[in-house]
Image (cartoon, rainbow, N blue to C red):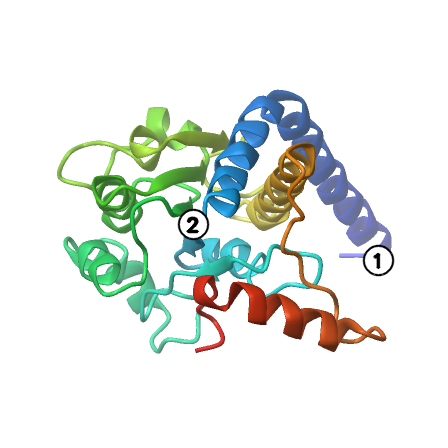
Amino acid sequence: MSSKSESKLAERYFDAAIGLLQRVRDEESGNVADAGTVLADAVEGGGRLFAFGAGHSSLAAQDVVYRAGGLALMNLLAVPGVVGVDVMPATLGSALERVNGLAGAVLDSSPARPGDVLVIISLSGRNSLPVEMAMNARALGLKVIGVTSVAYATETRSRHVSGTFLKDHCDVVIDSKIAVGDAELAVDGVDAPFAPASSVVTNALMQSMMAAAVEELVARGVQPPLLRSANVDGGHDWNGRVFEEYGDRIFYRR
């Protein structure tokens, strides 16, 4: 394949990603605002914030934890073996997503408590782990925000015994609009579609949700507990003061 052809495919990918970003901006703005309100309520009310994702969906969860310019209270709810592809074999992570009961065990041993918020990211929302995570979190009194592709609920079958999807157990659902299969490009001569865009779109949705929370807190006269980059002058000291003030609601430093 020539470099000219590669350039055309790269441009097509950018066009597809930009189109998806524009679509979620236009169609999901209300849900993003609702999610921001849920987060702001917890911040103002003394609650804690958690994010969970399995496999590549964990990237979006990690992107809002201990992040310069991010809310300091956002913690990663980690499930051993499903965060990233560092587990060997990598396929074990996918298998663990289908294990019944794992989510309950993780929540029971976590610091999450009533009044907290859990953001669950799952592209398909069909596996047992994200479904049970949402069900159990709500049973414990947490608010649940789901970031998922609603298309999977109509074009695939749930792998949970209830037959339900993540979207069915959330206080707020944000639809990433990603097509089933998560591949934006297809060309003659290549046997499978390629170029996934879920990470681009989901990360943007997570950051837009954080921005909506900041906006809501400011409207209430509450100073958002934000982190600064440690690579700018004064950033380390700033973060130290945030950690001291909110240390009982931050768990990634323990």
The secondary structure type at the circle numbered 2 is loop
Report the residue at 81% width, 74% height from top: 234
Q: Quadrant of residue 40?
A: top right
Q: Position of residue 194 (x, y in %)?
A: 57, 48
Q: Quadrant of residue 208?
A: top right
Report the residue at 38% width, 61% height from top: 77
Which mark sits nearer the N-terminus, 2 or 1? 1
In the picture, measured across the screen, residue 19 lies left or right of residue 194, that is right
Q: Are discs 2 and 1 less than 8 Å apart at CB?
A: no
What count of labels does the image hold? 2
The secondary structure type at the circle numbered 1 is helix
Report the residue at 43% width, 30% height from top: 172
Label 1 belongs to which residue? 3
Q: Amino acid at mark 2?
A: Gly
Q: Residues within 10 Å of mark 1 (few under 14, many from 20)?
A: few
Q: If the image is split into quadrants, where does the N terminus sit?
A: bottom right
Q: Which one is in front, 36 or 127?
A: 36
Q: Position of residue 79 (x, y in %)?
A: 32, 65
Report the residue at 65% width, 49% height from top: 224
Q: Position of residue 92 (x, y in %)?
A: 29, 68
- Residue 47 is labelled as 2
Q: Amino acid at mark 1?
A: Ser
What is the distance, in whole Å, between disc 2 and disc 1 at their CAs? 52 Å
Q: Which one is in front, 75 or 241?
A: 241
> Does 170 sit above or below residue 64?
above
- Residue 39 is labelled as none
In the picture, measured across the screen, residue 170 lies left or right of residue 138, that is right
